[in-house]
Image (spheres, grey):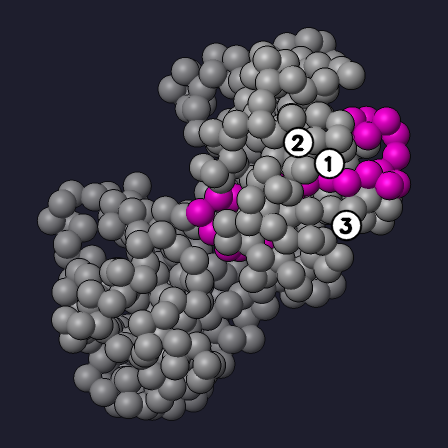
Amino acid sequence: MRIVVIGTGYVGLVSGVCFSDFGHDVVCVDKDARKIDMLRNGKVPIFEPGLDRLMIRNVEAGRLRFTLDLNEAMEGAEAVFIAVGTPTRRGDGHADLTYVMAAAQEVAQVAKDYIVVVTKSTVPVGTNRKVRDVMAATAPDLDFDVASNPEFLREGAAIDDFMKPDRVVVGVETERAAKVMAEIYRPLYLREFPIVVTDLESAEMIKYAANAFLATKITFINEIAALCEKVGADVKQVARGMGLDNRIGKKFLHAGPGYGGSCFPKDTKALARIGQENASPMLITEAVININEQVKRRMVDKLLDLCDGSFNGKTIAIMGVTFKPNTDDMRDAPSLTVVPALLGGGAKVRVVDPQGRHEGEHLLPGVEWLDDPYAASANCDLVVILTEWNEFRALDLTRMAGVMKSPRMADLRNVYSVEDAKNAGFEAYSSIGRPGMGA
């Protein structure tokens, strides 16, 4: 099939590359000339493991190309995926649909034959009907259908998530559109991955409900972790005991410094706003949003305790600033709360992150960037593990403690144990929801 993907951000680029690997003829369109030039030169503007190799393979096979010209891209297209940004609108928490509606209008202006316009971007319930209205008003004689096809891609594992999904959700209004979508996802049908075909509103709601539920699981275990610290329980044992119950499941029960990223913060805020606008408040989701911010601030208090009540004059090494490993994404990362608090308190901050520097230099001014964890730890008063990159899972703790001025560690991802820290020579160790070791 001939498919057009509008937007070469995270969702658009991963989707376009993977569709081309299904065997489809894919054209990715973007208004950013710099980004299109990068892609044409085989360079991926985001960090996603394996995406560069997959992209180059399909470009060389002639199934994938990039252009600024929507009109040219639309020639012979059977489906157009809108995968533009829907950032949180400042002031009200709602998703900004400006780019989605502009893309829909542009498609209507250049489309000539029957086309299925598929919203891949995460959008509030009712958006696809608005897309249909905008297109119908722009081109009253155009023969088209709209479809909702929300993405469920985890950063750092997006290709596997696309190729081996838990499910594919497709919202349609007509049998004709359903057949087009079935043809697009034929490789997954043949391998018997679940395809959920539903109405437009249900498809839109599935995305928000799923992300809000996962954010709730993370926030719940973080609250339990705080209580574990007070009563002497171990949150890792608690989470394991909970997760063995099949009704609960073990995934997303890992205590840490709070969730961040491109999806959970934006989607929970949007769902809360949708509830408010429809006089059906999402009280659990609203609580999750508030508690998650409290969790991030609680991390600052934990570090303050390890610094004897003051950051002033301390040198602190931060291991990881992206919101999770295997991505360069820093949107709403806990580091954006923790690091400014350290700097504001008078600390000197050194940062090590395999992919975070490109975004981090702009978002975290005033820190020193290093590539080596041990060089960053030299003469430090505190080491903080903030993102659980593989590089930080097998540190030589004895070596690290040996080069520090004051060997203290805040393990905010529960990578190590009190015994590990004690045996390595640390004088203080604190983690999340587990007994620590005081100085």
Q: What stretch is highlighted in magenta?
A: 305-331
Residue at the left extreme?
190
User: Which callout, 3 or 1, points to the residue nearer the camera?
Assistant: 1
- Dots 1 and 2: beta carbons under 8 Å? yes
Residue named by callout 2 = 403
Q: Which mark is residue 340?
A: 3
Q: Which residue is drawn at 55% across and 44% down?
A: 372
Q: Earlier in the sequence, mark 2 or mark 3?
A: 3
Residue 55 falls in image quadrant: bottom left
Label 2: state its secondary structure: helix
Query: Which residue is the site of mark 1?
Result: 379
Q: Where is residue 167 in the image (x, y as percent from the top left)?
A: 29, 45
> Residue drawn at (66%, 64%), measured in percent from left and top?
362
Q: Nearer the viewer, residue 255 or 206?
A: 255
Single out the mark in the foreground, 2 or 3. Answer: 2
Name the residue: 36% across, 52% down.
49
Distance from the alpha carbon under mark 2 to that under mark 3: 25 Å
Q: Earlier in the sequence, mark 1 or mark 2?
A: 1
* Residue 316 falls left or right of residue 202: right
Q: Marks 3 and 1, Cα distance to the nearest angstrom?
A: 21 Å
Q: Which mark is residue 398?
A: none
